[in-house]
Amino acid sequence: MNIASCNIQLPSSSYYSSCWCISPSTFSKPKPKQLSFNRTTASLLDMDATTNPGLYPLQRCKTLHLVRHAQGIHNVAGEKDHAAYLSEELFDAHLTPLGWQQVDNLRKHVQETGLSKKIDLVIVSPLLRTMQTAVGAFGGEGYRDGIDIPPLMVENAGESHHPAISSLNCPPFVAVELCREHLGVHPCDRRKSINEYRPLFPAIDFSLAKSNEDILWEANTREKNEEVAVRGMKFLNWLWTRKEREIAVVTHSGFLYHTLSAFGSDCHPAVKNDICKHFANCELRSVVIVDKSMMGSDPATTNYPGKIPSGLDLPSDVADEKHAEEGVAK
């Protein structure tokens, strides 16, 4: 895995800059610099920081598959007239027919690349368009009556005209409010009550919602970009309380943009762009996130201690150093 060292830059807090690193899971390899070596030293002081690779213990890393929801009715209306975002007709916007086509194509990609078999957990913003996207892309095949497990989505949920979606052979789906879109003012970003969602998405876990009603959205106050970024960092911190290593997150354009913009300032500009550019509808972008602060405590599952059975194993370079030290002492 090729990982770039990309520190967070958040002006409001120095804490984050020492704790987190995030980088694209794949990118072009930078050209190495020519270094001058002698027998005892190798100076790295002249290396450009943006060309230095990052190296981290695997147990300090998680792979995130970040997805922006597919096209919603608010995207269509808002592109024609920005004032439409203030319309109550767009309350908790659902996907368009084109949006469902985008979901079907993402699902094919997830299946063909084998990603569907790797994901341990799906985190989803509890809004209609994100939940429709999440279950459509990462859910099971069509639901059939007689199967003794609840479906991820019932038929025609949210004016979808879509058949029910099974939860069979799927990772867990958990709704998390921390990864919602900008809060306030726009009705499309206000959610329904949890009691309304549960019958539509029976297999999604809504237990983390703090209230049945949407108490986070305010009609007259729009969340600031900086506040979205801070909320995004809280979300990343929360991810480290989870045991899962490979996680899909289905969320929103604004949330992704303002959260990810805090990363990559010490990377090559092309890598920074890979991390921070706006997401298209139903785009999936995979990144690796690194805990550099000892926040997580997961043990290494693939490391092996060696020396079983025990035996003499002093490395030659250590022996050379020990011999030299003993010579000086004499």
Image: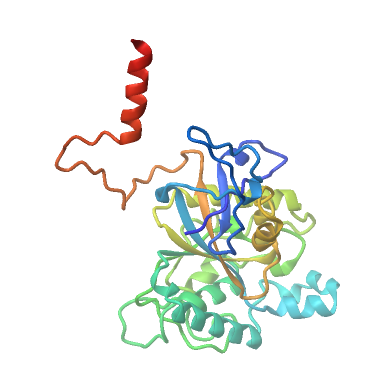
Identify the image quadrant of residue 7. top right
Q: Quadrant of residue 141?
A: bottom left
> Can residue 159 be seen in this snapshot?
no
Across and down, in percent, residue 187 comes to 73, 68
Q: Nearer the viewer, residue 191 or 135?
A: 135
The quadrant in which residue 101 appears is bottom right
Residue found farthest to the left: 309
The image position of residue 10, as x and y in percent, is 69, 43
**Quarter of the figure that contains the C terminus:** top left
Left or right of 237 in this view: 253:
right
Q: Residue at x 59, y 45 (%)?
A: 35
Q: Nearer the viewer, residue 198 or 288?
A: 288
Can you say whether 199 is above or below 145 in the image? above
Q: List x then y, in percent, for residue 63.
A: 48, 59
Q: Is residue 3 above or below residue 141?
A: above
In the rendering, at what x and y percent does residue 125 appear? Answer: 57, 64
Could you tell me which residue is drawn at 71 percent across and 80 percent down?
73
Give the residue furthest to the top: 330
In this view, 266 is above or below 204? above
Q: Nearer the viewer, residue 323 or 88?
A: 323
- Asked if residue 83 shows in the view, the reply is yes
Specify whether 3 is left or right of 243.
right
